[in-house]
């Protein structure tokens, strides 16, 4: 089993190390360091039963392995880290299934499934969790008759203004609770319906609890005239509160604990002898994986595209000339700007798509989230409109879309998948971001702003991005 793990780690070393780097820098996923030791414990815990199973290769596993390698290629070539990492970590259980067969893998099924908690997924839920937290906080404040005004993610009470920031979304609590709750359900219950109910409970409880935590922070600050729970200490209160929530969750779950299984088979002589035949499935496995890795390297080394000619009619822009609002896109090839009265039009061009220059990346922002906060989002045909605000009460309309040679859409997933297909077909992944913004007072309403922005989005900008 260790040899299979070692082979997997060597083949996908860059992706594995990139994932570990996320565990190191993100508190949200720091618990992922514990997943491998827990999986080892779960396998050792079931070792007497496991060693009685017969090793029988299952070559059908090559089919899902092939599919996951295609998914890995998509994620890697499109710089879609979540997809690349999911495919990489899902390949390890498939390796075991191929080499060890059905009976052995059935005996360690939960450990193989629990392994997928190593993948740092879930941050896409942050905007939704921020809204839910704000909803619960405002509803609870109104029940206590505290005057409250909500503007997007800003919550104002007499004497103070609060923002439901990313750190307050509860994503850390949710992911940690989900992982711990799943492990607790497996160890505590024998019936699958009880396990599923408790797992659902472990997902619902932290969402509600985080809303009540945010309400408690605002309440403490309001009652103390903003002396307490307004700085770093509210994060400390949050973790203490989360510890209590986990304790309560486990205490409730323990009420319906099932008795442990007593049908553990006696210890028998373990592990069948290692022979060359035992590792024959590794040969087609290596051929598949190495083919995918070699194709990735050949598809990634494409010549960058030239800047579309129509962009050269506009002025270059840099951060030094920035006003109150501006989009932040890292390592763009060129950024050009057009000003029409109070309306600004930004064209952000990427001549390639790799780890050094990504058009769609979590670090790229349509507005500085340290200054501005989202109020509303409206999807339109071919583009998206947002309303944003800041602590000074300023409001802006922001409309945007992404453009490649194939697509023109604000949907980041569609763009990423399209770029992956371009790379698979040997085409350069050039891209353009078009962002239009204006102060709210510059237009009578959102419909008037949309009418002005539609002039740009109605044009077919894809032609300028065809390979040159």
Image (cartoon, rainbow, N blue to C red):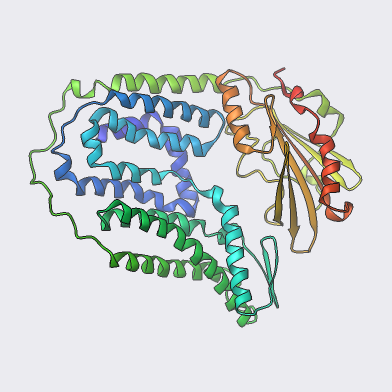
Q: Position of residue 290 (x, y in %)?
A: 40, 21
| Quadrant of res 199 | bottom left
Residue 291, x across and y down, in percent: 42, 19
The quarter holding residue 331 reads: top right
Relative to 394, say whether 110 is above or below: above
> Which of the two residues, 84 or 205, is positioned nearer the viewer here?
205
* 271 sits left or right of 204 in the view: left
The residue depicted at 69 percent of the width and 55 percent of the height is 374
Q: Is residue 411 visible?
A: yes
Residue at x 58%, y 54% (from the top left corner): 128
Left or right side of 464 for 355: left
How many marks the image carries: the answer is 0
Q: Residue at x 47, y 66 (%)?
A: 239
Residue, far bottom: 224
Is 182 displayed left or right of 171 in the figure?
left
Q: Is 352 drawn above or below residue 400 in the view shown?
A: above
Of residues 267 and 37, the one drawn nearer to the viewer in this rendering: 267
Residue 180 appears in the rendering: no
Please state the horizontal and vertical placement of residue 431, each as a whole percent of the image: 69, 30
Residue occupying the far front of the picture: 193
Identify the residue at image location x=50%, y=48%.
122
Quadrant that contains the N terminus:
top left
Compare residues 383 and 219 and report the one nearer the observer. Answer: 383
Check the picture and name the quadrant holding the C terminus: top right
**x%, y% of residue 446?**
81, 50
Task: Say whether residue 368 is left or right of residue 173.
Answer: right
């Amino acid at each position: 089993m260790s040899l299979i793990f070692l082979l997997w780690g060597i083949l996908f070393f860059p992706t594995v190390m990139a994932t570990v780097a996320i565990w190191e820098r993100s508190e949200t996923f720091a618990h992922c360091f514990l997943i491998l030791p827990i999986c080892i414990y779960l396998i050792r815990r079931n070792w007497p039963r496991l060693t009685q199973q017969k090793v029988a290769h299952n070559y059908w596993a090559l089919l899902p392995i092939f599919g996951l390698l295609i998914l890995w290629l998509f994620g890697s070539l499109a710089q879609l880290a979540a997809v690349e990492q999911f495919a990489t970590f899902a390949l390890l259980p498939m390796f075991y299934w191929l080499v060890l067969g059905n009976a052995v893998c059935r005996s360690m099924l939960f450990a193989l499934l629990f392994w997928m908690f190593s993948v740092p997924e879930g941050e896409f839920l942050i905007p939704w969790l921020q809204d839910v937290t704000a909803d619960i906080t405002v509803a609870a404040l109104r029940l206590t008759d505290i005057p409250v005004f909500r503007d997007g993610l800003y919550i104002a009470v007499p004497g103070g203004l609060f923002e439901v920031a990313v750190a307050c979304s509860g994503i850390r609590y949710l992911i940690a609770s989900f992982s711990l709750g799943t492990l607790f359900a497996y160890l505590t219950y024998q019936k699958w319906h009880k396990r599923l109910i408790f797992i659902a409970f472990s997902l619902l409880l932290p969402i509600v609890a985080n809303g009540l935590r945010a309400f408690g922070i605002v309440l403490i600050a309001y009652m103390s005239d903003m002396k307490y729970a307004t700085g770093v200490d509210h994060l400390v209160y949050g973790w203490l509160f989360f510890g209590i929530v986990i304790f309560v969750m486990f205490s409730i779950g323990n009420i319906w604990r099932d008795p442990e299984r007593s049908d553990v088979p006696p210890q028998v002589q373990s592990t069948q002898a290692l022979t060359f035949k035992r590792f024959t499935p590794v040969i087609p496995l290596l051929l598949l994986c190495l083919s995918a890795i070699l194709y990735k390297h050949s598809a990634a080394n494409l010549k960058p595209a030239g800047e579309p000619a129509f962009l050269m009619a506009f002025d270059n822009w840099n951060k030094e000339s920035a006003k109150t609002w501006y989009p932040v896109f890292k390592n763009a090839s060129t950024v050009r700007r057009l000003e029409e009265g109070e309306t600004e039009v930004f064209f952000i061009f990427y001549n390639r798509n790799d780890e050094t220059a990504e058009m769609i990346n979590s670090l790229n922002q349509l507005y500085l989230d340290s200054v501005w906060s989202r109020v509303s989002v409206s999807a339109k045909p071919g583009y998206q409109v947002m309303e944003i605000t800041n602590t000074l009460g300023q409001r802006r309309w922001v409309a945007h879309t992404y453009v490649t040679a194939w697509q023109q859409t604000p949907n980041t997933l569609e763009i990423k998948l399209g770029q992956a297909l371009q790379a698979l077909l040997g085409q350069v992944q050039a891209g353009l971001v078009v962002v239009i913004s204006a102060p709210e007072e510059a237009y009578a309403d959102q419909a008037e702003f949309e009418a002005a922005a539609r002039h740009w989005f109605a044009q077919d900008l894809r032609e300028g991005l065809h390979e040159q």
